[in-house]
Amino acid sequence: MPHTTCCVVGGGPAGMMLGLLLARAGVEVTVLEKHADFLRDFRGDTVHSSTLDLLDELGLGEAFSQLPHRLVDKLQVPVGPGVNVGADVSRLRGPHKHIAFVPQWDFLDLLAEAGKQEPTFTLRMNTEVTGLTTRDGRVTGVHYRTADGETGELGADLVVACDGRGSSLPDSAGLRERSWPVPMDVWWFRLPRNEGEPVGASGRIGNGRMAVYIDRGDYFQIAFLIPKGSDARWRAAGLDAFRANFAALMPWLADRLDTVTSLDDVKLLDVKLNRRARWFAPGLLCIGDAAHAMSPIGGVGINLAVQDAVAAARILAGPLRRHAVSWRDLARVQARRWLPTAVTQALQRLIHAKGVTPALRGQLEVSEERSPRPLKLMARFPALQVVPAFLIARGILPEHAPVFARRPGNPAS
């Protein structure tokens, strides 16, 4: 059986970052990605300040700045005429007082190209992992299938599941999952943006509807929240009903809804919020959404996944070089990343309960008089908007690049 020191399953943000960092540590690492390329729309396009700092440390800041992207320094909710509150990232310290919106495929291509500069890095596209190989209760590698139907096995000292919330590997290893109910799913679509229209990111709540729009330059990326499990019912109501519902919420965008020519243009995000009690088994580690699926609230999922990868690389590089990864080493990764994950998910559950649920039930109207107390306080004392900005853009316990992975380079401006 072919063998690698670390087999990374999934070429998303966590998998590509982990592969790059381990390769820079001199670890033989193979990343298996089931698709032929990274071209998927509406997939975690939010790159927060902590990740931008990390790219600078890796010497990739300048290359990132050349990608098509949009910088946003405020995430706002209108609470009255001319009054907006939310997360003011411009109040943060550091070089990146903003959040970047960049097509995820460009971000992943950047990491892949950096990885290919390392002699111990291998990326295999069109290679879907179909199961784990085990011996004496320990994971020893993976079964895979290529796009042309070829099957095979790849042995590994360590398998890291980075293949998202749909990963089958944690269940195969008996890692139990705790799930929390969520009130919504999300319909993603795009609408043209005209010169002079709102910049940044904001949203609207009213009449039992809720939506967020993100300025992506020549178009708005729209997140239209629908009650959990109602996708089939909304699609059965038809395109005209969808247009009418959205136009009632955001009438200033109604004149371009005809660009959504079919509900096939509207992509469903099946929202989940869960966390594995244990993220590891002998020979296996789960990080990112494979360990803890996040709500889209705050757009923090990609950044938590990247932070997991950084922590895993720092803790495991030495043991992997010695071909001696222990249960204790894997436990250290979870111990390092458990608190920021648990706190972030607790905040998301609070926002679900106090904001999203009543909004979708028509019980929450955001206005200057009727706004929730935290929004009123932030409207009165704008400096308080740095608190949600820090939680979203920096996060709890942000990770920095290990010394072995740092490279000189001009940081992005």
Image (tube, rainbow, N blue to C red):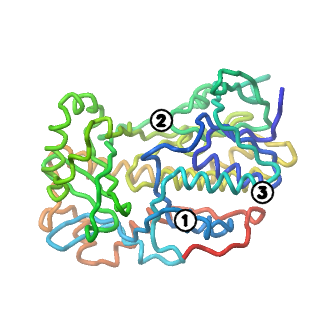
Instruction: Please tell me whether mark 3 or mark 1 is closer to you in this view.
Output: 3
Q: What label sits on residue 178 in the rendered view?
A: 2
Rendering coords of residue 290 (x, y %)? 56, 39
User: What amino acid is found at the position of numbered circle 3 in the picture?
Assistant: Arg
| Image quarter of the C terminus | bottom right
Rendering coords of residue 27 (x, y %)? 81, 49
Which residue is nearer to you in this view: 193 or 367?
Answer: 193
Element on which disc 1 rests: helix
Direction from residue 289 to residue 28 in the image, left or right:
right
Q: Earlier in the sequence, mark 3 or mark 1?
A: 3
Proximity of marks 2 and 3: CB atoms separated by less than 8 Å: no
- Please tell me how crowded label 1 is: few (under 14), some (14-19), or many (20+) other residues with Cα within 10 Å: many
Q: Residue at x 50, y 60 (%)?
A: 47
Residue at the disc numbered 1? 50
User: What amino acid is found at the position of numbered circle 2 in the picture?
Assistant: Arg
- Please tell me how crowded label 3 is: few (under 14), some (14-19), or many (20+) other residues with Cα within 10 Å: many
Instruction: Please tell me whether mark 2 or mark 3 is closer to you in this view.
Output: 3
Rendering coords of residue 275 (x, y %)? 50, 40
Q: Earlier in the sequence, mark 1 or mark 2?
A: 1
- Please tell me how crowded label 2 is: few (under 14), some (14-19), or many (20+) other residues with Cα within 10 Å: few
Tell me the quarter of the picture where residue 78 sits. bottom left
Whole-number angstrom distance, CA of label 3 to CA of label 1: 20 Å
Hey, which residue is sitting farthest right in the picture? 322
Which residue is nearer to you in this view: 132 or 65?
Answer: 65
Q: Residue at x 44, y 45 (%)?
A: 41
Rendering coords of residue 292 (x, y %)? 52, 42
Residue at the disc numbered 3? 24
Element on which disc 2 rests: strand
